[in-house]
Image (cartoon, grey):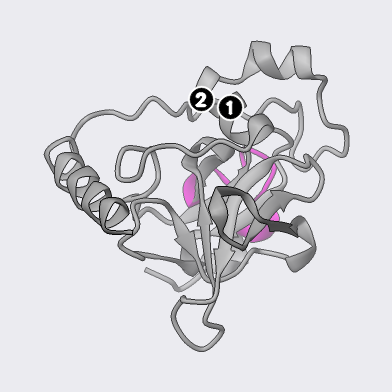
């Protein structure tokens, strides 16, 4: 346990030096042709369209490095969609700094857009979060988040694509604009 804490400290310290470094997680449109598609592309197609890290995280239940990923420190207003299907998953309004080095959210946009599964890997019991339509690994949900719900959806940036508020309508997600009206 002490080694894990030391590793997290060193990762965080190293990440602070690299904060200005451009992350490799792509922000290109998702693999799907339209927002919220219902068909998951084939494994071969995913390998062609996703980066190696995105494929590893979403299809092989991988984890990207903390404090060295595209969205852990993103404070812009917008939504986060599934990199595979384009399904809307989280909003910046529910994002918070958990200090873990990964994007953390208090709740999904819609509860039925994510699926929770028991995960007993890594010698512990956790709850894995997967995209409902893509069946892609997103991350895990923990009960140590802020009030009132107390949940922390700890999600890999490599599983997400961020769409800023000013591009929501253009990219087919205009129905989410009212969430941001009057918010700064």
Image quarter hosting the C terminus: bottom left
Question: For this rendering, which residue is in front, 124 or 136?
Answer: 124
Residue positioned most to the left: 17
Q: Which residue is mark 2?
A: 53
Image quarter hosting the N terminus: bottom left
Question: For this rendering, which residue is in front, 177 or 50?
Answer: 50
Query: Above or below — where is 46 with respect to 130?
Result: above
- Give the residue at x 40% y 51%: 102
Mark 2 and mark 1: Cα distance apart in space:
5 Å
- Give the residue at x 15% y 45%: 16
Residue 42, label in figure: none
Residue 56, label in figure: 1
* Coordinates of residue 41 in the picture (x, y in percent): 81, 24
Question: For this rendering, which residue is in front, 182 or 12?
Answer: 12
Residue positioned most to the bottom: 148
- Give the residue at x 68% y 31%: 59
Quarter holding residue 64: top left
* Coordinates of residue 57 in the picture (x, y in percent): 57, 34
Looking at the image, residue 134 sits to the left or right of residue 60; the answer is right
Looking at the image, residue 58 sits to the left or right of residue 101; the answer is right
- Give the residue at x 44% y 80%: 146
Q: Secondary structure at mark 1?
A: helix
* Coordinates of residue 37 in the picture (x, y in percent): 82, 37
Q: For label 2, count other residues whose C-alpha is less than 10 Å away and answer few (under 14), some (14-19) or many (20+).
A: some
Looking at the image, residue 97 sits to the left or right of residue 77; the answer is left
**Residues in magenta, as a range:** 165-176
Q: For label 1, count other residues whose C-alpha is less than 10 Å away and answer few (under 14), some (14-19) or many (20+).
A: some
Residues marked 2 and 1 touching at CB (< 8 Å): yes
């Amino acid at each position: 346990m002490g080694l894990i804490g030391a590793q997290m400290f060193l990762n965080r310290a190293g990440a602070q030096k690299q904060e200005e470094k451009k992350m490799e997680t792509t922000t290109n449109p998702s693999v799907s042709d339209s927002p919220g598609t219902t068909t998951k592309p084939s494994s071969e197609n995913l390998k062609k369209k996703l980066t190696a890290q995105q494929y590893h995280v979403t299809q092989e239940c991988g984890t990207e490095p903390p404090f060295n990923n595209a969205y852990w420190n993103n404070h812009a207003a917008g939504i986060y969609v599934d990199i595979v299907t384009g399904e809307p998953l989280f909003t910046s309004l529910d994002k918070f700094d958990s200090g873990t080095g990964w994007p953390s959210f208090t709740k999904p946009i819609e509860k039925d857009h994510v699926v929770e599964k028991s995960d007993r890997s890594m010698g512990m019991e956790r709850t894995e979060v997967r995209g409902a339509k893509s069946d892609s690994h997103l991350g895990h949900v923990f009960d140590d988040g802020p009030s009132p719900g107390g949940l922390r959806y700890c999600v890999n940036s490599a599983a997400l694509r961020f769409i800023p508020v000013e591009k929501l309508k253009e990219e087919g997600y205009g129905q989410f604009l009212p969430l941001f009206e009057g918010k700064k």
